[in-house]
Amino acid sequence: MRGDDSFDGVPNRLAEEASPYLRQHADNPVDWYPWGEDAFVRAREENRPILLSVGYSACHWCHVMAHESFEDADVAGVMNELFVNVKVDREERPDVDAIYMEAVQALSGQGGWPMTVFLTPDGEPFYGGTYYPPRATHGRPGFVELMRAIDDAWRDRRDQIDQQARQLTDAIRANSAAQSADSAVGDEQIDAAIGGLMSAYDQEWGGFGSAPKFPQPSFSELLLHRSFDSNNPGILDAVVATAAAMAAGGIYDHLGGGFARYSVERTWTVPHFEKMLYDQAGLVRLYTRLWRASPDPAWAQVVDETVTYVMRELAHPEGGICSAEDADSEGVEGKFYVWSLREVETIAPEAVEWYGVTEGGNFEGTNILRRRIGQSLLRPPAIEAARAALFEAREQRVRPGLDDKVLTEWNAMFLAALCEAAATFGRDDWAAAAGLLADRLPVRLRRADGRWMRAAGSRHLAVAADYAWVVDAYTRLTELAGDSVGLEIAVRTARDMVELFWDVDNGGLLTVAHDSEQLIAAPRDTYDGATPSANSVAAVALARLGALTSDQSWTERAEQIVFSMSGQISRSPTSTTNALLAVDLLHRGIQEVVVTGDRADLVDVVRSGWWPRAVLAHGPGWDSPLWRDRKPGLAYVCRDAACQAPVADAEALRQTLAHR
């Protein structure tokens, strides 16, 4: 049996965990606990602080710290001697991650992963940071020295630590509260967000802000949404230029499709090479919607290749989609993706100029394939053959590690995006794949009692973001399939979401269900960052669900969510860009489009054009006032309980939908 401060060669407590990230640490000489009461009981009994380490499988610097410190017997010995050590997969426990990330950001002014936080035995944070090298270097404190200093403070200055922990915890609790404003939000806040985004827009390289650059689909989606109403062509131009720059850059995999998580510099050339399912979902949706607003075969190519990548490399054999691929292979970041000039000349010389391959390279003496901004993304036959040859050669390399965790939230995100893409591009194969995914998710991720879980095989209950995305995904499936099967799942999940997560005092959704483990604060997910927040996704999904079901109660819930966020929306509109989509839908009204009978031409008008406020009902119909007294073979368009005259002509429908 393991001793208190020594390693006896037996895999630690993480060996039986569902998370691949936790299992990666099962053979560490660290006496790891998964997050749970056992760790806190031991910490209280022995009066030791908790050392909380949070990361995820595809995180490069998480692997670096694991190799340097957690696999090192001497460093692990210090950890085991002084602390009760807890390892958390941030993707499995976003609630734990959110609370302690807020503490780290308050302490250091920045955050990231790996995250290292020191807690009292009651779970209150008192010190933390991100990556620490084992020994002090380049101005960074060494991990061993830091742990010794924390131990000294714990023993000799406990009063100061307890005071710091209380202050941090109080601040986290205060920041978790709903932030409603005195007045309603609307066009003023949307315009402020548009202005902020355009001010941050990089005119030379696309994107928003400087390095590092994240795709931030919700930024472009808000601009795209506003371009429908605006006479300012610069708004759409910014979206087009950003999409073109990302698809040309090294952040995009030109051989296998799909996007890396972010670029470390302005030009989108050098990424952190991990590929996350949520990025694929968000960008499939963005490029699909961009194609509808500004048709370009390049956008269709990006969508096609990204969907193909996901289905080829991330599909789980038991159903669902895996979470991510690592940045590293054979212990080297990006090794799978980079090329020497000699390799490319030997395999596919036609690709040298096309992808800008040089002797010196653009990344540590090697080449990340990319196109220069302004060059065509569409490949002529000779280049397509060269690309295929390079892809086949790359397939012989050791692939990056796969995080095969199947998360409800990210799978529902991808299902929603796939439904939109299948409808927009008329892809029956994608529609079939969406139907299969929709069938498998409840089997793998929902208990017999109907309760959604965070991940397949996990003991952790789903959080609010999981429920919100399920509502959105099955609503989109309804629009794609034209039947009520998806709508029934969306409605049931929406009911459960409100029952489990609703903040009865302030409105909006709490991250953790009322009957789940309660942490030191009740987190509330309202920040639209790399992924949209749970509350903003729920507001959009419920507004659209209300339109499809003609059930005003869902619309009212969406309005209440927006009101609970209105203070944040007013103070920081660019941090709530997806929530502002809900504001727009609720403020201007959703176009409810009902196509009766066998009128594929009318359905195609709705699917192919850019009508950002439209929901589509077609097929045999379902129990809703939307379908009452409708004659076959017509399109009906209603908004705010007022209906236009039904039309039978595709162009007439297009003109009706174009009405602002």
Image: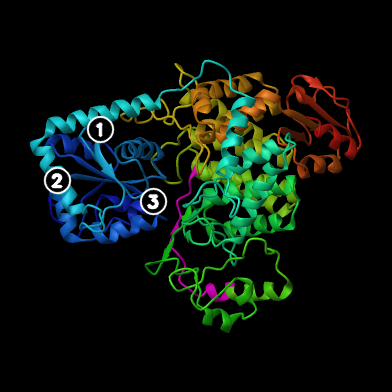
Q: Quadrant of residue 657?
A: top right
Quarter holding the C terminus is: top right
Tell me, yes or no, if residue 612 can be seen here.
yes
The image's mark for residue 76 is none
Can you tell which mark lies on residue 149? 2
In the rendered image, which quarter is residue 471 located in? top right
**Neighbour tally class for label 2: few under 14, some 14-19, many 20 plus, Cα within 10 Å:** few
Residue at 46% over, 52% down: 212
User: Does the magenta stretch mainly form a helix, a strand or a loop?
Assistant: loop
From the top left corner, tell me how far across and down residue 626 is, in percent: 77, 25
User: Mark number for residue 124?
Assistant: 1
Instruction: First in sequence, mark 2 or 3: give its number.
Output: 3
In space, the residues marked 3 and 1 are separated at their CA atoms by 22 Å
Tell whether label 3 touches label 2 (CB within 8 Å): no
The kind of secondary structure element at disc 1 is: loop
Tag 2, which secondary structure? helix
Task: Give the total number of marks visible in the rendering.
Answer: 3
Of the pair 415 and 451, the residue shown nearer to us: 415
**Which residue of the protein is positioned furthest toward the right in this rendering?**
649
Query: Is 548 drawn above or below residue 46 in the view shown?
Result: above
Disc 2 marks a residue whose amino acid type is Ala
Label 1 neighbour load within 10 Å: few <14, some 14-19, many 20+ = many
Q: Is residue 450 visible?
A: no
Q: Which residues are magenta?
A: 391-408
User: x and y percent of residue 240 in the render?
Assistant: 67, 50
